[in-house]
Image (tube, rainbow, N blue to C red):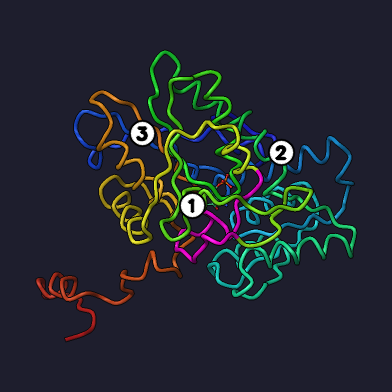
Amino acid sequence: MARFESILGTVGNTPVVRINRLAPAGVNLYVKIEAFNPLGSVKDRLALGVIEAAEKSGELKPGQTVIEATSGNTGIGLAMVCAQKGYPLVVTMAEQFSIERRKLMRFLGAKVVLTPAAGRAVAMVTKAVELAKTHGWFLTRQFENEANADMHSRTTAREIVDDFKGDKLDYWVTGYGTGGTLKGVSRVLKKEMPNTKIIVCEPEDASLLTSGVAQERNSDGSAAAPHPAFKPHPMQGWTPDFIPKLTGDVVDMKVIDQIIRIPGPDSLKMSMELAQKEGIFVGITAGASFAGALRVAAEAPKGSTILCMLPDTGERYLSTPLFGNVPADMTPEEIEISRSTPSVQFPAT
Ligand code: PMP
């Protein structure tokens, strides 16, 4: 750690941490914890990457309003970057994403325009495109923007290559939301660590890649229609109701070694297991990716080394099913502990 010129200097360089209690014997299982980014998710990287690329190209003018359609983390990252750099930010977001996300963005100074749940991701993107056109705002286009993947090639991928230099990395496990992480990292690994297998996880209920059905696209690469294999799933931030351009590119590059389908309940369970057995506090897609990594670990030859991406912090999910079984009031067990000594009691007996 050093002194930083602004908060933006703290994006990236996230730690790789060994899994001890949850890993099967004989494999080296590591996680890369993106919750260490300043606003708690992998999307801080994209936010900084797309804004700085647009500043450089002249596409984004000083003081111009920035707009994006986002399930939350991108908006939160963009809100941080825009706050620091002085750009107004408008975010369109489908109403079903967690309340914390809306409030966080508003706290950081952004405007949040909700779209109906029934319209899913396609509706929030349509709304963002229309608002950008109408008002002359800069649309970051996270699902198609090459600056998204480029940032991951420059930062996430470099960090991984450096952290495993002189060692081997047999498997790299990730999910996809935009596919920025997947595209940016996989192309560098294929070149510089060609023996590393690329493992992609997706929700069992929305196995868009597994389905093999191609995505209908507009000429700019954006989705022309919802993908037929999509069904709602609890992994907020993963797999929208279309295959993003950046994800489709990776399929076309033929660098994916295996696709694993993760059931929704496994993602919630593994997020909690990471918290309770490893002290690693991360979100739902992290639990989902980790469930995939454990499947890889179960089948990998002894001595294998696996790295799994954990995209965000668990704090973003307090109002979601992730915390559904966590009571606010004392449990019978806690009351029993309380009653085991005579002084202060709650409730008073
Ligand atoms: N997990 C969460 C919680 C996310 O918000 C995102 C991004 N939407 C991802 C995973 C996937 O990252 P990427 O967009 O780079 O594919």
Q: Which of marks 1 and 2 is nearer the N terminus?
A: 2
Rendered image: mark on residue 22: none
Mark 3 highlights which residue?
A: 30
| Cα separation between marks 1 and 2 | 25 Å
Q: Which of marks 3 and 1 is nearer the N terminus?
A: 3
User: What residue would you read off at disc 2?
Assistant: 146
Disc 1 vs disc 2: which is toward the camera?
1
Q: Which amino acid does label 2 sit on?
A: Glu
Relative vertical location of residue 316 with respect to residue 187 in this rendering, above or below: below
Q: What stretch is highlighted in magenta?
A: 227-245
Whether residues under marks 1 and 2 lie with C-beta atoms below 8 angstroms apart, the answer is: no
The relative height of residue 156 versus residue 212 in the rendered view (above or below) is above
Q: Distance between the residues labelled 3 and 1?
A: 29 Å
**Amino acid type at image mark 3:** Tyr
Q: Name the residue under label 1.
A: 211
**Percent x, y of residue 18:** 33, 33
Give the image location of residue 253, x and y in percent: 59, 32
